[in-house]
Amino acid sequence: PAISEENIMNREQMTVAAALTVAALALLAALLMGGYLLRTLNRMQKLLRDYREKGSAAFQTMKETRESRLESSLERILQQAAGKEEAAERERDEVAALLSDLSHQLKTPMANVRMYTELLEDDTLSEEQRRRFAQQANAQAEKMQWLLESMLKASQLERGMIVFTAQFSGIRETIGRAVSGIYAQAEEKAITLQVEPFEDRRLWHEPGWTAEALGNLLDNAVKYSPEGSTITVRVQPMEIYTQIEICDQGQGIAKEEYNKIFQRFYRGENTGHTGGSGLGLYLAQLILNKEKGYITVDSREGAGSCFRVFLLNEV
């Protein structure tokens, strides 16, 4: 049967009405979504503003909603950013303190180098005087170089920039290297370096760095020991660790200074005019800590000191 014109018009009207309804619903949904996004954006802006001004914000991280998940992500990002900022500030403070300490430590040897250099310009000096002043200037320059190198090593160790490849290896050669490095200084003061016989043991360490740590302890012993005295090195096996003991006959250390002597640039009250920078023990402790070892000290004023290094035994 033929479709009447009236039916066609009704259908067209229904189609238009349906289209308008769909369009209206789509517009309403868009408005609702836009409102939701606007509220969410305003909420995020408020959270960011509060976090920036107060250091905290009322994050709704306990609710199981899309907004709370978004806020939780925002909170983690802000916390990570704050952590990085704090780390950067600490690093700046550490660098500033390091430069301040280094500047203070370099001031005296630098002034001495300038003084000896000016003295060498005097034409009336004898060859013997000129040679002696040149040696003094060179000694001060070497001290500055040692300070710079030691501070660089300490800073790299503190920041984890130096990674040890420690392993179980024989300790005899390591101790021998440390003793050989200090032999000339001991000989100048007629100090006897006595290494008591011991069986070689495999200990957890990096030989080069451990030799430097032991060398710093031996150097410290030589500096503060009287001429003609004896420095004794002993190796004593224990259940978990092996103890390496370095004992001198020097002036000793007061008990209240035991912890202080391992601090950077600290020098004991009774060191007097004895040369030193206060870096040797500090650096030795850093090295041994990286090797899962440690140092202790036992001393009495006027009766010498014993520094004990502990390194892990091979199981």
Image (cartoon, rainbow, N blue to C red):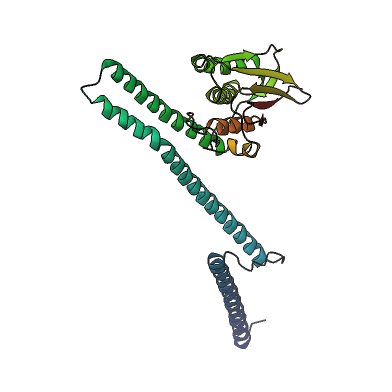
Residue at the extreme front: 302
Q: Residue at image x 61%, y 38%?
A: 257
Q: Residue 43: which quarter of the image?
A: bottom right
Instruction: Give the answer, above or below, for where 162 lies relative to 101.
Output: above
Counting from the top left corner in percent of width and height, residue 152 is at: 48, 34
Instruction: Give the answer, above or below, for where 245 lies relative to 101.
Output: above
Residue at the extreme right: 239
Counting from the top left corner in percent of width and height, residue 104 is at: 43, 40
Counting from the top left corner in percent of width and height, residue 315 is at: 77, 22
- Can residue 94 be seen from the camera position used here? yes
The N terminus is located in which quarter? bottom right
Q: Residue at image x 59%, y 28%?
A: 251
Residue 68 or residue 199, whichever sits in front: 199
Counting from the top left corner in percent of width and height, residue 245 is at: 67, 22
Q: Residue 253: which quarter of the image?
A: top right
Q: Residue at image x 56%, y 67%?
A: 54
- Can residue 170 be seen from the camera position used here? no
Q: Residue 39: which quarter of the image?
A: bottom right
